[in-house]
Image: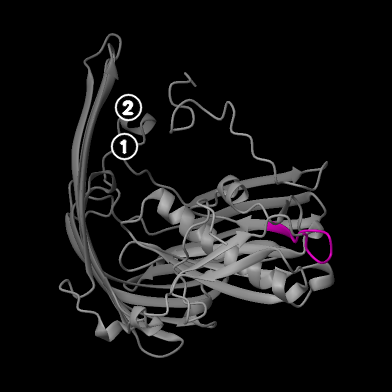
Amino acid sequence: MATPPFMPLLRLLWPVALLAVGVAPLAGQAPTGGTLPSVFFDCDGPNCNSQYYRTEITWVNWVRDRQDSDVHLIVTSQGTGAGGREYQLDFIGEGDFEGYEDQIRHTTLPTDTDREELDGITGALAVGFARFAQEAGFRGLVVIEGQVTAEEDPAEGVVAAEEVEDPWDLWVFRVNGSANLSGEDTRSNRRMNSFVSASRVSPTWKINLFGNVNYNRRRIEITGQDDFVDARTDYGFTQLVAYALADHWSVGVRGEVRRIVSFNQDFRWEFTPGLEYSLFPYEEATRRALTVYYQIGPSYRDYIEKTALGQWHETRWEQSLEIDFSQRQPWGDAGIRIRGSHFLHDLDLYNVSLRGDVEFRIVRGFSVNAEANVGWVSDQIYLAAGSATTEEELLDLVRRSQSFTYGMEFGFSVQFGSIYNNVVNNRFGGGGFGGFFGRGR
């Protein structure tokens, strides 16, 4: 049976004998149990386009609540060294199928179009659902067709990394630039931004280099006074070199050269070696991670104005410790980060911050979420001795002295009604490809 045009060819090594796999519904044939597998789609991040997947995969029931599902699908992802993304698809059995677990990984290329990325993920989802259907007894749903002919050797398409001839030696370069002009009679704003980056990621090494230059000119007409004009140019160059020391250990060094006008810094450089320990294997980072990161190093600052501590320039040593925990599970997701730092020459110059977020599914159709952060600040050695103007304070153009920061957000979601989420209707979905383009919103 031919594969329908709406199902993509799958670039998955499952099994090795199939270089490309097509999964398609069997027309006119009902499953053994008379029903379709029910799927709860749980995704947070890029390409969480449930409407597209529901349109392409019509041989499962998409439900709105985890308690109504046969399989809970959790989609997480992380960036790859070349600029693409690696998606991790976890299939977790629910109800009568509790205990079933399966995992598929799919990698997109940085040159893939949006459609190619969606089609690739759709194919990976289809294979995962087919494997679940076979294991759970939903037989007769799909047929798997290999695209390898008898004359072809399946092993020819599987190449080890060391066998690839890469003239770029895994290096990836990016250049970006933009310009913006906006305004009206009483105000105008000009912005020009540019950046260049180079990165190389291998199983043992990670190298990231990034440089940027930003120009911003703002003019505001003030009644009875001269126009307020603020023009500034910031630039920066940062580098990270990290090495996989062992299964749970990594070492690295961060460097920085920067100009930040709002922080009263005409020139700044930092050099900070660091050590990181991961309690869980790094391969599980998209589902759960607990890392401890420590760094120490010197920092030089040349100030635009004399600081409140009477310095025009200074070199200070600083150390920091950061503990980061995050996880995404069938009940929801949660994360917490604790970070503390201080200058070695004066322990009273410190910065401590705590940030956490949680989303919890309490009962069917009801979930709560919360996010909060709090910080204690006592390390603003860069503050200028002079006071800021009223305009600079109102426009937040300069940093001001503070000792405490906080933020909180709470929310909940209640959903009831039909458990099914299969129907797709694109009418009045938005004017143009941008959703609200041309709608005057």
Q: Where residue 260 sits: x, y (%)?
A: 24, 49
> Residue 338 at what x, y percent from top left?
52, 67
The answer to whether residue 263 is above or below residue 169 is above
The residue located at (26%, 46%) in the rendering is: 384
- Which residue is the site of mark 2? 391
Judge whether 267 appears above or below 316 on screen: above
Residue 330 falls in which quadrant of the image? bottom right
- Using the image, determine if residue 167 lies above or below residue 173: below
**Does the magenta segment cover residue 412?**
no
Q: Spot the residue most to the bottom.
A: 246
* Quadrant housing residue 342: bottom left
In the rendered image of this protein, does residue 35 appear above or below residue 218? below
For the record, the magenta segment spans 30-40
Q: Which mark is residue 397?
A: 1
Q: Residues within 10 Å of mark 1 (few under 14, many from 20)?
A: some
Secondary structure under tag 2 reads helix
Dot 2 alpha-carbon crowd within 10 angstroms: few under 14, some 14 to 19, many 20 or more: some
Task: Tell me, yes or no, whether the two marked residues, 2 and 1, touch with CB atoms within 8 Å.
Answer: yes
Residue 364 falls left or right of residue 342: right
Give the amino acid at mark 1: Leu
Asked if residue 79 shows in the view, the reply is yes
Q: Residue at x 76, y 73 (%)?
A: 136
- The x, y position of residue 238, in whole percent, is 23, 63
In the image, is residue 32 part of the stretch drawn in magenta?
yes
| Frontmost residue, 406 versus 293 | 293
Left or right: 418 as drawn, with respect to 284: right
- The spot of residue 248 in percent (x, y) is 46, 86
- Secondary element under disc 1, as helix, strand or loop, is loop
Q: Quarter-wise, where is residue 40 in the image?
A: bottom right
